[in-house]
Amino acid sequence: MNSSSSQKNFSHTFDELGCEKITLTVNDKKTGASQTSEEWVKVVNIPPKFSDIQVKVENIDMDPMRISLRMEGAKDPDGNIASYTWYYYTSTDEQPQGFRITTKPETSFTLPKINGRYYFSVVMEDANGLKVDTRDISEEKFSTPDLLVNQNISMPIIDFKANGTDIKYGEPVEFSVNVKNALGQDISKAAEYRWDIDGDGFYDTKTSDPHFTYKYTIPGEYHPKVKVTHRGLSTTKFITLNVVNRLNPQAAIQVIGDKIVAYNMSTGIVQSVAWFADDKKVSENKDYLIYSVSDGTFPTSIKIQISDGKDTQEATFPIARNAKNKTLLKKIEKPLIVLTNDTNGNVEEVPDNVIWKDPLKPLFFYLGESTGDIQFYAIDNDIDIDTDLSGGKDDDADNKGTASYRMGRPYSVPMGTKRTTIMRLRLLKSDGTEIDSRQIRVTRDFIAPIVDTENPTTVIKSPQVFNLSAEDKARLDKLQGLVQNVPDEERKDLTRYLDQLGDIWYDRADRAETLLQFSQAVNISKSMSPELKTRILEQVNLIYTQGQQDAQEKEIAKKMIADFLAKSSYKKEIFGDGTDSNSGLLGQIIDNPEYYEQNKSIVQKIYDDYIKFDKQISDEAKAVIKDKLTMLIGNPPVQTTTPPPVVTEEKVSLWTKIQTKVTAIVGDKGPIILWIGIAVIGLLGLMVLVKLFSGSSRSTSHENDHHDDHNGGLSTTPENNHGPDWLHADDQHNDHHDNHSTE
C-alpha cells in the first residue's frame, strides 16, 4: 500500500498479522532531493476483553435450577469475537464441565443444587483464532449466590479415572469411579452410573457398578463422561483420552471350489487396501475380495496390504482348492444361503442367533452363493425401524446402492448403538417378488446391556421402557410426530435427543438439559420451516413447564404432609431422621417416580400403618394427607395390554326419574310435594270408588242374594275368582317392573 502525506504523522491499520516493512521516503520540494528509511513493524493480535459476567438464577426455589449467563462489555479491539465457549466448575471440583459454544455473549445452564457454588467462565475466540479464558484475565470469580447452596449430604462427590490417558487402538480402557457423600462416606455401591463413552452428549449405557471396560474402535481424542446419581441427586464429570492408531492386517478366507472369498478383518484406521493373489494385485476393495480363477492357475496364498497414509503393513495367508465347501452348499435345500466371516474358513450357514463379540473385528453377511432368478439381495438392518419412512417395516433395504444389493457381495453389518437387533434378509425377483427370506438376531456382546438397578439380573429391552404416565407419553409421542416432519438430514439428530429423553425422563436435571439442547438444535436448523419450528418449540415448552409445575406441586404436597404430621410419633418413619430431605418412606417415592406400583404400595403402607388410626390427626386432615400422598405417586403408567373398561349405563327406576324431575322444577321440597300430590289423588280416587261401589251394591243386591242361595252360600264362580287373581297378577307385574327398573 502506498500513501502520500504532507503531515509529519501518519497512521495505518494492518489487516494481517506478522512482520510488516514500513518504508518512509522524504522529498525536498525545492531541491528535489529525497531520502528513504525502512523499519519493520510486528503486527500482533489484541486479545478480546470483557467487563463482567452476569449470573442470574431464574427459578431459585426449584431443583434443578435454570441459570442464565451474560457477558458484559465483551469486545475485540482489533476485530470481532467469533465464538464463546462457556463452562462451569464447582467449589469442590475445579475441573471444567459442561462445555457449550455460542456465537452470542449469553447462554444458560440447567444444574442441580449442590453443596457449594457453581463458578462460570468463558473462552472468547476472535476471528484470528486467538483464545482468551476469562479465568486468565480476571481475578473475579463469577458464581451463583450463597442462598443456592444445598446442604443435602446425599450429593455424590466423584473422582473419575481411567487406567491411562494414551491408549493404543484396540486395547481395553478400564474406567473407575470413586463416589463419596458430603460426610466423606463411600456410597459407590449405592449409586447409579451412566456412561457417555465417546463424549457426544448421549449416554450409551448405565450400570450399578462403578467400573466399566471399553474398547475404542476409532483412534482419536475422546472425552468420556460419567454421570453418578444417588438418591435423586446427580454429578457429572469427564476425562480426556487419546487413542493412538495401530495397523494390524488380518483377513478371514473361504475357498469355495475355484472361488476365493476374503473378508478384511484388519484393525486401525485404514485409508487404502490392496489384495494380492500370490504376487499379483487383484483388488483394492477395502472390505472384501471376491476372486475366481479363470486361467486355471490357482494361487497358493492371499496377501492383504493396508496403509494409513504413513505406515503400511501386510499379512499373507496360505490357501488351497476346496471342493468340499462347494458340495456342502449344494446340500442346502433352500434358495437363500447366508455365509459369514466368523466360521474359520468353513461355509456353515449363519445361525438364527449371532453373537458379535469383538467390535474391532467386523461382522459380514454374504448372500452371493444363493440360488434362483435373483435380481436383488435386500438386507434390513433392524426390522423395528422403518428406514425409508414408507409406513411399513417389511420393505426396507438398507443396503441399497451397494454391491451387496445388486450382486450379493459381502455386507458389513453396521456397528449400531443397540445391543440386539433383528435383521431381515431377502431374495427378490426383477418384479419385486420375494423368493426367500430369513430373520437373524444379532447381539453385540461388546455393548453392555441396560439393566434395572433394583434387579440387576433383569435386562431392560430399551431405555424407553420406564413407566411413563399416559400424559408424559402423550407429550413425547406428539413431539415425536412433529419430528417426523423434519427433513432427513436433521431428523436423525433430533431423534437421538428424543431417545435420550425417554431414558432420563425422571432425572429432572438431565431432562431439562436435554430439552434445552433439543431446542437449540431446532433453532439453528436451516431446513425446517418457521411454522414447524414454532410447533416443535411450543411442544418442548409445554413439556418443560409441565415438569416444573409437577415438581412445584409435589414439593407443596410434601410440605403439607409434614405440617400435618409435625407432632406425629411416626414422622421419623415417614420422613427419615432429618439428615436427608429425601429419606424415609416418602423419600423412596420421590427418588423413584418411575416405579409406580412400588410407590403405590408404599403410600398404602404409610396411610394404613401410620395415619389411618392415629387419633391425634383429624379426619379432615387424614383426607388431605391421603390426597397429597396419592398426588406424589403421580399417574399410573401406560398399560398397553389391558383393554379399556366397558362403561355401562346405570338403569334408573321410573319412580326415581319422577322424583328427579319434580326436584329439578320445584327444588329440594320436591319429594314432599310429590307425596302430598299422590295422597290427594289417592283420596279423591277412593271417594270415587266408594260412590261407585255404593250404587252398584244397591242395584245388584237382589241378584246376588238369589245367586248365593242357589249355591249354598259359597261364591265359586269364575268371575268372582278372577278379580283376586287378576289383582294379584298385577301386583306381581308391578313388583317385577320395579325390580327390573332398579337393577
Image (tube, rainbow, N blue to C red):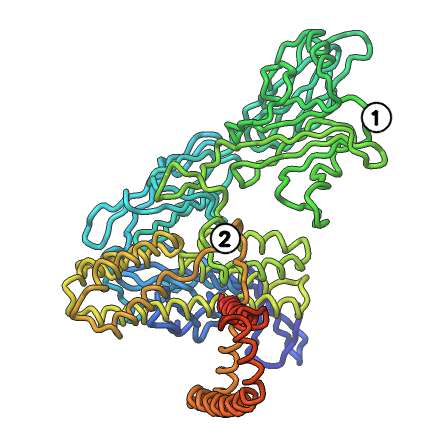
Please tell me whether residue 195 is drawn above or below residue 723 in the rendered image.
Answer: above
- Under circle 2, the secondary element is loop
Which residue in the rendered view is the most extreme toward the right?
431
- What residue sits right under mark 1 in the picture? 373
Of residues 636 and 463, the one drawn nearer to the viewer in this rendering: 636
Residue 631 in view (yes/no): yes
Q: Amino acid at mark 1?
A: Asp
Where residue 186 sits, quadrant-wise, is: top left
- Tag count in the figure? 2
How far apart, in angstroms, are the residues tagged by discs 2 and 1?
47 Å
- What residue sits right under mark 2 in the picture? 639
Residue at 59% x, 58% y is 480
- Under circle 1, the secondary element is loop
CB-based contact (under 8 Å), mark 2 and mark 1: no
**Which sits earlier in the primary sequence, circle 2 or circle 1?**
1
Q: Residue 734's x, y, as percent?
A: 52, 71
Of residues 554 and 716, the one drawn nearer to the viewer in this rendering: 716
Of residues 151 and 30, the one drawn nearer to the viewer in this rendering: 151
Residue at 56% x, 27% y is 354
